[in-house]
Amino acid sequence: MGPDPVLLETISTGDELVRGRSIDTNAPFIAERAARIGVLRFRHTCVGDDPAALAVAFREAAGRADVVIVTGGLGPTEDDCTRRAAADALGAELKFDEAVFAAMGERFRSRGIAMPARNRVQAFFPAGSEILANAPGTAAGFRIEIGGASLFFLSGVPREMEVMFAEHVFPALKKMRGAGYTGAYRAVSTFGESEATVDEILEEIQRRENLSIGLTALLGRIRVTVQTTGPGAADRADAAEAEIRGLLEPFVLEAGTLERSVAALLAKRNLTLATAESCTGGLVGSLLTGVPGISAHYLGGVVSYANSAKVSLLGVPEAMLAEHGAVSGPVARTMAEGVRRALGADLGVSVTGVAGPGGGTAKKPVGTVHFAVAGPDGVRTLYRKLPGDREFVRRFSANIALDLVRRSLRKP
C-alpha cells in the first residue's frame, strides 16, 4: 500500500446487532471493497444504541484511524441515536438542514404517502457536517472530521449503505490512498472442496513473498483473495490468479457465484432449466431469478413440499414414495425428470431432504439430502449428509443443487 497506508476502522451500531437479533453484513462489505484498493481495516467495533458509548467509540476510533466508517442509527426512531452521539463526539450542536428535509418530503409525496412528523429528526446533523445523500432511502448520511480522522456515517440498511459507500466513501478512500499506490487485488471463488483442502492445494503459493492469500468459507463456497503491492503488482497478481485458477479447476466458479455461473453456462450453451424443490422450498429458483437476464433460460419451478404435490405435479409414483420415502435417490431422480418434462426444459434439477430439526430417522437423519439433474443424456444423482441447523441445511442444499447443474453444463 505504499509508505503511508490508510488506516480504516468500521463501527456498526444497534442493539439488534449486539444482542444477536440481526446479522451485520455491512462491515464485511465495507472491508472487502476497501481491500480491493489497498485500504485494509485493522479494527471493527459493534456498539449498541447508547449515545454515550457511541460517542466514546467515535472519539477512540478517530484517535487510531485515518478513516472511520459508521453504519446504522440514522433512522427516525428514538433508539436511532447516532446523530446525537456524533455531535457529542465532535463537541458540536445538531443543526437542522432545510434542503434535506425538503428532499425527504418530496420523496414521500412522490410515493403518495404523508411523511410522519417523526421523520423530521432525520434532517438534523452535527454542525459543520458534509451531507451525504442517500438515493434509495430517507436517512441521509454525513461526514465529519475529528482530529485528523474522517468519519463517514451511513445508513444501516444494507441496500442503502452499499449505494452510499459507492457514491461517497469509495472515491474518498481512493483519493486518500494517493495516486502513487501500486497494489493489486484479485479474487477467485470456488465450490466443491473444503477450506482445508483448498488451503493445502495453495500451500506453496501462500509462502511466496509479497503475496497475501486469504480464504473465506460460506455455505460451501470458498473465496480466495490475492493481494500484493509494489512494482509489478498487477502482473504478479494476474499470474497468481491464473495459477490459482489452474490448481483449483474444476471447482472455480465461472462468474463469481453459483447462480451467475449457472446462468452464464446456460446462455453459453443456449439451454433451459427447470427446478423441482422440496426441503429448499424455492431457494434454488430464488437464487436464479436474482440474476438479470435469467428469464431467457430459467423456465420456472415446482415447490413440491407435500408428497401429494410430488405425485400430482411431478409424476412421482405413490408406490415409489411408499417403498423409498420422499427423501431418496429414486424420488429425486423422478422429480428432476418430471419437472423437465412438465416445463419442457432441457435440464431439470431436484432437491429433497430432511432439513430438521424434526423428521429425521436412524436411516435418514436430519441433514440427509438427495439431488438429481436430468437432461438429454440421462440423470445424475447425488447424496449428501449435511451438518447444521435447518437454515444451514436448506441454504447449503440450494448451493449444491446449483453446483450439480453447473458441473453438468461444463461437460462437453
Image (cartoon, helix red, strand yellow):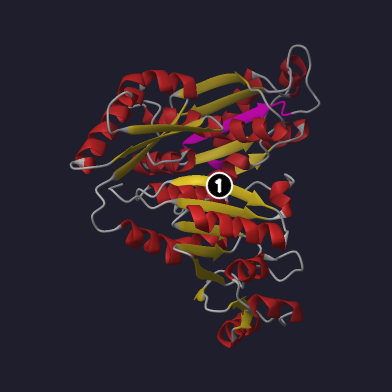
Q: What is the tally of numbered marks visible in this picture?
A: 1
Q: Quadrant of the C terminus?
A: top left
Q: What segment is highlighted magenta in the picture?
A: 342-355
**Quarter of the image holding residue 395?**
top right
Residue 122, percent from left and from top: 65, 75
214 to the left or right of 58: left
Residue 398, percent from left and from top: 59, 35
For image coordinates 69% across by 35% down, the residue present is 391
Q: Let me know if residue 350 is in the magenta part.
A: yes
Residue 333, percent from left and from top: 59, 24
Which residue position is annotated with label 1?
44
* In this view, 281 is above or below 157: above
User: In this orientation, which residue lies closer to the viewer: 235 or 92?
Assistant: 92
Residue 148, percent from left and from top: 44, 63
* In this view, 393 is above or below 186: above
List the single residue furthest toward the top: 363
**Quarter of the image holding residue 245?**
top left
Q: Let me know if residue 234 is in the magenta part.
A: no
* In this view, 125 is above or below 40: below
Judging from the image, what secondary structure is the residue with disc 1 in? strand
**Can the viewer see residue 86 in this picture?**
yes
238 to the left or right of 148: left
* In this view, 75 is above or below 209: below
**Can the viewer see residue 291 in this picture?**
no
76 to the left or right of 68: right
**Quarter of the image holding residue 158?**
bottom right
Q: Amino acid at mark 1?
A: His
List the single residue furthest toward the right: 358
For image coordinates 54% across by 40% down, the residue present is 274
